[in-house]
Image (cartoon, coloured by chain):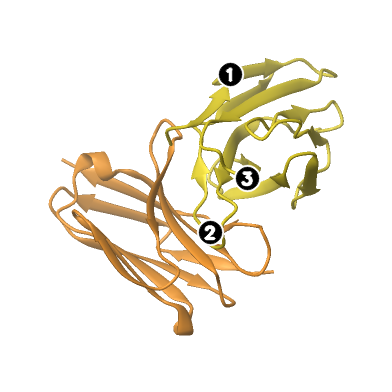
């Protein structure tokens, strides 16, 4: 969706490396989310943040970390503790008003070298 | 937590045919969205429809919240409709729960 920028589109990680995926939105949305998608599967929630300087774990947070220092930015770090990081990662955001839809970026494909 | 089941898992159509995709969910929801994921992975919002009926061109959707299901209708399908269609719901938490999707292939 327009207004949510994820970078890079493709990322390669060596064993033992941490990598950071960028997500920026200019929609003035309060809440931001990170999802992981494996082949043939739906999306699963990694972390989410409803306000600046606050975030919560989703269903599969182990091996990942996030920060929310600015309203428009929600970077995701895939740490070396994540043993199976190869996946498609999608960032989303939504306004803080009740019951509003989430809008998604175009995703980052992460692969292990 | 909420469970989401989509059917059918795979659907193959000839161009011009109509189709209905179904999404069942296990609990009351505050939010239901239909998405189309194209071959490049982009997730496109189709409908935000926690209840009622909406139409957008050849696509329409109906959610019957009291019976815990939603239907996505595609009429006069085109090859560009190919991809995976996801239903996602949100209950009392912040989490959006996705089904496994329906993979649609439209042949010319």
Of circles 3 and 1, the one toward us is 3
Q: Badges 2 and 1: C-beta atoms under 8 Å apart?
A: no
Whether B75 is drawn above or below A6: the answer is below
C-alpha separation, residue under disc 2 versus residue under disc 1: 27 Å
Pointer 1 indicates a residue of which chain?
Answer: A
Q: Quadrant of the C terminus of chain B?
A: top left
- In the shown orientation, is residue A64 left or right of residue B80? right
Of circles 3 and 2, the one toward us is 3
* Chain A shade in the render: yellow
Q: Residue at x 18, y 58 (%)?
A: B75
* Chain B shade in the render: orange
Residue A108 or residue A22, whichever sits in front: A22
Q: Residues within 10 Å of mark 1 (few under 14, many from 20)?
A: some
**Residue B30, percent across and down?**
55, 69
- For this orientation, the residue located farthest to the bottom is B66
Same subunit, tags 2 and 1: no
The residue tagged 2 is: B99
The residue tagged 1 is: A8
C-alpha separation, residue under disc 3 versus residue under disc 1: 23 Å
Of circles 2 and 1, the one toward us is 1
- In the shown orientation, is residue A50 left or right of residue B57? right
Label 3's element?
A: loop
- In the shown orientation, is residue A37 left or right of residue B40? right
The residue tagged 3 is: A30
Q: Residue at x 44, y 35 (%)?
A: B42
Label 1's element?
A: loop
- The circle on residue B42 is none
- Count of numbered tags: 3
Q: Residues within 10 Å of mark 3 (few under 14, many from 20)?
A: some
Pointer 2 indicates a residue of which chain?
Answer: B
């Amino acid at each position: 969706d327009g207004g949510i920028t994820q970078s890079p589109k493709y990322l390669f990680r060596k064993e033992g490396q941490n990598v950071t995926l960028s997500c920026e939105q200019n929609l003035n949305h309060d809440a931001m989310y990170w999802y992981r998608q494996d082949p043939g599967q739906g999306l699963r929630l990694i972390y989410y943040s409803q306000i600046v300087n606050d975030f919560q774990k989703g269903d599969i947070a182990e091996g990942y970390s996030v920060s929310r220092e600015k309203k428009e930015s929600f970077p995701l770090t895939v740490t070396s503790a994540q043993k199976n990081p190869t996946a498609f990662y999608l960032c989303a955001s939504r306004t803080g008003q009740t019951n509003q839809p989430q809008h998604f970026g175009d995703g980052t494909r992460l692969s292990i070298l | 937590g909420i469970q989401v089941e989509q059917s059918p898992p795979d659907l193959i159509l000839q161009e011009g045919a109509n189709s209905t995709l179904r999404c069942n969910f296990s609990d009351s929801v505050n939010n239901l969205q239909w998405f189309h994921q194209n071959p490049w992975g982009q997730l496109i919002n189709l409908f935000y429809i926690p209840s009622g009926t909406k139409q957008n061109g050849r696509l329409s959707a109906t959610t019957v919240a009291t019976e815990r299901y939603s239907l996505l209708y595609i009429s006069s399908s085109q090859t560009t409709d190919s991809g995976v269609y996801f239903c996602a719901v949100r209950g009392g938490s912040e989490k959006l729960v996705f089904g496994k999707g329906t993979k649609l292939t439209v042949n010319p």
